[in-house]
Amino acid sequence: MDHVPLLEHSPARLAAPATHTLICGENLEVLPRIAGELPPVDVIYLDPPYNTGKREWMYDDDRDDWGEFMRERLIILRGMLADDGVVAASIGAQQVHELASLIQRTFTRHRVHMVTVEVSGGKSAGGVRQVAEYLLLALPAGFRPAPLPWALAQSEPRQPWEGLALSTAPKGRWPNQVYPVYVDRKTRAVVGVGDSLQDLLDRGELEDATAYRFSETTAPAGSAAVWPITRHGRECSWRLSRDAILAAIERGHIKADPTRMPGNPNQFSVKYLPAGATKRVESGEIDILGRDDAGALILRSHLPTSADIPTIWTRKEHHTARGTARLRELIGENTFPYPKSVALIRDILLAVSGNKPDAVVLDPFAGAATTFDAVCELNAADNGSRRAVLVTNDDGGIFEQVAVPRVRAVAAQFGVPVSIRG
């Protein structure tokens, strides 16, 4: 593989930003050295020892000091992570709760979520069949994941209408969002709205919001007054102000259906098009088929654009057997235990860096260097320029026998430059 573009350089600096880097050394010693050489890291992927009690693998996986071992490294990594960066950690059942606690206490501005990932067809231990491990995601405020195609494909086509009642807002919080909506009893057309609580307060007809009572007495003949009430019968507010709903009615963005909520005294349930759906309608992404007899838009059902990360992943391409097959394809037979599937790491990186195609990805427990493989595959798929920085030690020959040959083979396959620091 002499044609693989490997770069030599001084130990004082990492390679140029476009160059991927594999470093051999104990991460506790390496990370402080490279912290000042890297830009803020966008994604830290952790695949630490699972502390399974195994001693016969290429590395010792039985540590009495596992918590302190991880805490020291997380503190260093905290200083390397960008303000809007993400931490993703794979871990087994043995230490999942301790690691979740350590991450939350270290990255205090992030929220931690756990994803269950099926990684095998099942291995029996003491009468319990183990099929899954866990992915911990530490996400910053305002984080928006990129969509996972397979997750979207599992979604059912649906209509974009949402309930107009805002159950979390008591009726006195926003007085201009409390008013009756009038619905024709026969046609279900929304024919108007009544005075808001704010209107009554402004005119001096009420002294305060607590005196306001929901009632049907103001409804025009042939119409029902619909009030903002939760499914459990509690008074609340609408999501739109009185002026906003009048404009939405004109555009056909308000509709009424018979209520199906036990405990709600309303005859009808009022729905509206939220801002995101309105933009998709106006852009033509959601087709308008016409208007119904009540004047509301008729829209073609669509797949949701939600990029939410599912909390259960059950895909065979994520199984460890796929990781073993890929490693064998690249370097032949090896003794590295349970390498991650490239598809699993690719999907993790897609979800957390799909909106950052130039992300810096740091893997301080690189092991078999699967993360490098996944970064190259993802870059090739979306024309990204993500940079992988991997650190691994050479316990049991991991660096020389597994990581280096794999990185060289992957670099040759994708035609990318990589710096290897022994």
Image: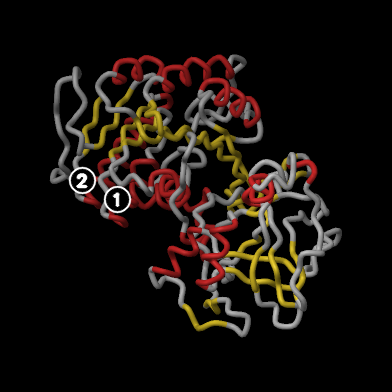
Disc 1: which residue: 379
- The residue at 68%/66% (across/down) is 270
Query: In front here: 351 or 45?
Result: 351
**Image quarter of the C terminus:** top left
Q: Secondary structure at mark 1?
A: helix
The kind of secondary structure element at disc 2 is loop
Query: Residue at 63% across / 28% down in the picture?
Result: 95
**In the image, is residue 416 above or below residue 187?**
above
Residue 94 visible at all: yes
Q: Left or right of 402: which side holds 416?
A: left
- At label 2, counting other C-alpha atoms closer than 10 Å, the crowd grade (few under 14, some 14-19, many 20 or more) is some
Which is in the foreground here, disc 1 or disc 2? 1
Placement of the N terminus among the 4 image quadrants: top left
Identify which residue is drawn at 55% across, 28% down: 56
Q: Residue 190, image x and y in percent?
A: 65, 72
Q: Where residue 151 sits: x, y (%)? A: 53, 59
Q: Position of residue 366 (x, y in %)?
A: 40, 33
Q: Indicate the quadrant where residue 359 lies.
A: top left
The label shown at residue 416 is 2
Please indicate, yes or no, whether residue 324 appears anywhere in the rendered image: no
